[in-house]
Image: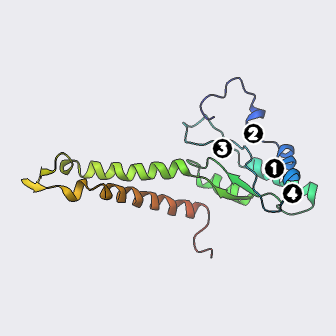
Amino acid sequence: DGVDNSGVSKEKLYSTPEDVFAVYEGLQPISERFMIAAAFGNVHGVYKPGNVKLRPELLQECQTYAEAKTGVTKPLFFVFHGGSGSSTEDIQYAIKAGVIKMNIDTDTQWAFWDGMNKYQKKNVDYLQAQIGNPQGPEKPNKKYYDPRMALRSGEEEMAARLVKAMQDLNCIDRL
């Protein structure tokens, strides 16, 4: 869970190539279009360094195992659950190993909150009352405390985080 894995053997924290291939064999007869959410040290949320050891090379090991079994190049499609906080290097390695979808909800939530927080800090003197601010005791503050203003700042920060994700995922200018 990214917090306390005491009492759990390291082998149980990661998917094995055999486990992943068993999932592949189970789903392949149903459809050729599916993704496998292999456990390779990915967890939902962001945790202090050292609690989680991301091992994207495990995805390549699974891919190599499946290639040997099927004779097909890159037969596995992976989803990267819990991608928030991952390095660009790990993300790009995971993509090369077969990741076609990545979740970054924690990062986008933080970006949205951070944008709203920055707005509040920047405009704190205008957010203390409806009237009265550094420009004068009679000056109105409506345009500052309008919730759409703080929300807009959150949206802008989240949009910037999504651009970063698109860069990390090699998704810019692909269509």
What kind of element bears circle 2?
Answer: loop
Across and down, in percent, residue 17 comes to 84, 46
Label placed on residue 61: 1
Is any part of residue 65 visible from this angle? no
Number of residues whose C-alpha sits closer than 10 Å to that of mark 3, classed few (under 14), some (14–19) or many (20 or more): many
Q: What is the spatial separation of the Cα atoms under label 3 and label 2, in whole angstroms? A: 9 Å
Q: Which residue is mark 4?
A: 28
Residue 79 position by quadrant: bottom right
Q: Which of labels 1 and 4 is toward the front?
A: 4
Q: Residue at 36% x, 60% y: name it.
A: 152
Across and down, in percent, residue 155 comes to 41, 59
Q: Which amino acid type is marked by label 4?
A: Gln
Tell me the quadrant of the picture where the C terminus can be found.
Answer: bottom right
Number of residues whose C-alpha sits closer than 10 Å to that of mark 1, classed few (under 14), some (14–19) or many (20 or more): some
Q: What is the spatial separation of the Cα atoms under label 3 and label 4, in whole angstroms? A: 24 Å
Q: Which residue is mark 2?
A: 14
Q: What is the spatial separation of the Cα atoms under label 2 and label 4, in whole angstroms? A: 22 Å
Of marks 3 and 2, which one's residue comes earlier in the chain? 2
